[in-house]
Image: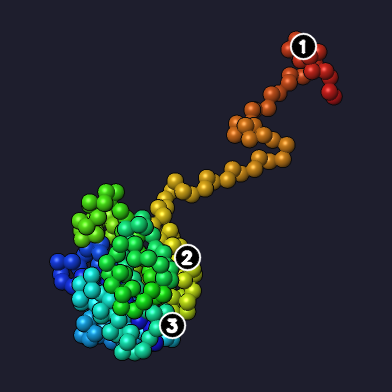
Amino acid sequence: MLIFAGLGNPGTQYANNRHNVGFMAADALHRRHSFSPWTKKFQAQVADGTIGGEKVLLIKPQTFMNLSGQSVGEAARFYKLAPSAVTVFYDEIDLAAGKLRVKVGGGSGGHNGIRSLDQHIGNPYRRVRIGVGHPGVKEMVHGHVLGDFSKSDRAWLEVLLDAIADDAAMLVAGDDNGFMNRVTLALRDRLTPTGDDDRPPPKEKPAPKGQSHIRQARPPKPAVSIPESGPMAAMLKKLLGDKK
């Protein structure tokens, strides 16, 4: 059995915050795979299901972000699971918006939800870090993560969440690099603009053998008839030679 935990803050006022992208990932997984309806347990909303043939407990802690570890730790202890059986989805300001990285263990990076998990279940669990970008100034970070995603963010966000749900079986199988590559390719393929300007120019038809393209493009000159007799005939025969 595995635990997939999405981090966020409960309440409709936080639903569209960048800080709640972990909840959004959990919801995308719930929609895509065979999970039971959400129920309340372990101070969280939980659902049972399978991904890639493995039983998974999907969990959204309702303890608020800073105490996320209480909920996830309670579930892990109940099922006697090691930290390696836990995968956590959360926002990462040190990644550009739309980027995704997976790692096992490491520091909290100042993320209070991750710090809480480290305290309650230890460090070596899988972290799926979803980039939400940095506002550029430390003093603006709080407002940035608790601010809603913009309309322009929705273009990449929906693609990324769909890709997480589509390729979650790779996380179950432990293929973290493969999972990252698939998500990156999905974003590239869905978001790269295409249009007439991107099409290769049409190939020129080859000129008939022995002719240049310039000669081919010009209409043929009308044939000149050479008079058989008279002064003009004599002059032309002198210039061209008598080819008869």
Specify which label sits upstream in the sequence, 3 or 1. 3
Between circles 3 and 1, the one closer to the viewer is: 3
Q: Please tell me how crowded label 1 is: few (under 14), some (14-19), or many (20+) other residues with Cα within 10 Å.
A: few
Q: Residue pushed farthest bottom? A: 79
The residue tagged with tag 3: helix, strand or loop?
A: loop
For badge 2, the amino acid type reads: Asn
Res. 232 visible in picture: yes
Classify the position of the C terminus by image quarter. Answer: top right
* Occupied quadrant, residue 34: bottom left
Where 56 sits versus 87, above or below? below
- Residue 182: x and y, percent? 46, 67
> Which is more N-terminal, label 1 or label 2?
2
Asked if residue 229 lies left or right of residue 191, the reply is right
Circle 2/circle 1 CB separation < 8 Å = no
What separation in Å lies between label 3 and label 2 (alpha carbons)?
Answer: 18 Å
Three-letter code, disc 1: Met
Instruction: Give neighbour class at mark 2: few <14, some 14-19, many 20+ (Cα, 10 Å).
Output: few
The picture places residue 221, in percent across and down from the top left corner, at 64, 28
Which quadrant of the figure has residue 169?
bottom left
Question: Could you tell me which residue is drawn at 73 percent across and 37 percent down?
Answer: 210
Q: Which residue is mark 2?
A: 181
Q: Nearer the viewer, mark 2 or mark 1?
A: 2
Q: Which residue is mark 3?
A: 52
